[in-house]
Amino acid sequence: MCTFLFEVCAYFYGYEKPAHHPSVWQPLSHPIPAGVYVLVFLGSPFTFGTNLPPLSLALGMGGLLVLILPICAVYLWSNHYDRSLLGEALPWLMLAMVAVSAALLTMIGRLDFGPSQARASRYVTFAVMLPIALLALVPVVRSHWTRSFSAPGQRMTKAVSVLSPAYPFILMACPSFLADLPVWPVIRQARLYGKALVSFINFVPEREELARRVFPYDSRVKTAANAIGRARHCPGG
């Protein structure tokens, strides 16, 4: 924990926010919008591919995730003497905290842009770590919790597990997956096109396309591409 705090302090030392970004202290004066932003961020992976209102859906799914996580965390804290339980659960808890930390840090810098911005596709990579972590963490906690039950109680728990809170997430993840399938070839084609632009930058420089598809400053792309090319042709490279 101390190492993490040191890294955060070192990262933000001398930080200067961009002029068009909101104040980093804004969440303190607007706690409700800040909370909404975080929940939408965490629930965003389940909002694609459906006709449901995306913000309301993200808010609900994020709220359910945030409800489950503290329950697991409190249970682990109350059973911290069980090293076997902690050994199984802590890696998944840390993965969940990566998603929560990303949501909080993004909210600090993007709160003024509104909750719709929290659904940006680039954030899904971080947000999806929370449901993945809970998918493993919840069974670990449930299994440990039911060990003290009698045999009938354990059978009852297994029967009730049919109503697992994981099912809404699985149900909502399927439309997102299916909706993204047609996009994958398009993304691959765009990446290959960008690669071709960089590969032929010295012969057919397409500045506008480079700026739109690869990087806004074509001179920096050219410098980097040539440096990589020289490194690849060096002996032993």
Image (cartoon, helix red, strand yellow):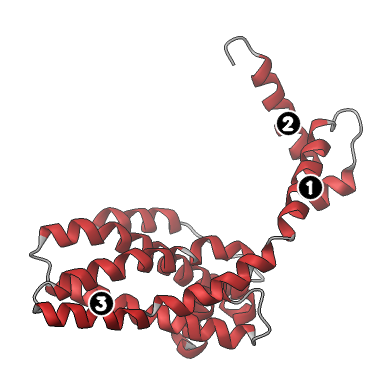
* Residue type, numbered disc 2: Ala
Residue 10 position within the rendered picture, expressed as x and y whole percent measured from the top left: 39, 53
Tell me if 155 is positioned left or right of 168 in this view: left
Q: Earlier in the sequence, mark 2 or mark 1?
A: 1
Query: Above or below — where is 109 with respect to 9?
Result: below
Where residue 94 is drawn, which disc sits there?
A: none
Tell me if 195 is positioned left or right of 99 in this view: right
Tell me if 56 is positioned left or right of 101 in this view: right
* Residue type, numbered disc 1: Gln
Which residue is at 13% across, 57% downward? 84
Residue closest to the eye, 43 or 213: 43
Which residue is at 8% across, 75% downward? 148
Q: Earlier in the sequence, mark 1 or mark 3?
A: 3
User: Which SS class for mark 3?
Assistant: helix
* Residue type, numbered disc 3: Lys
User: Which SS class for mark 2?
Assistant: helix
Which residue is at 41% across, 69% downward? 100
Residue closest to the eye, 163 or 18: 163
Residue under label 3, please give it. Answer: 158
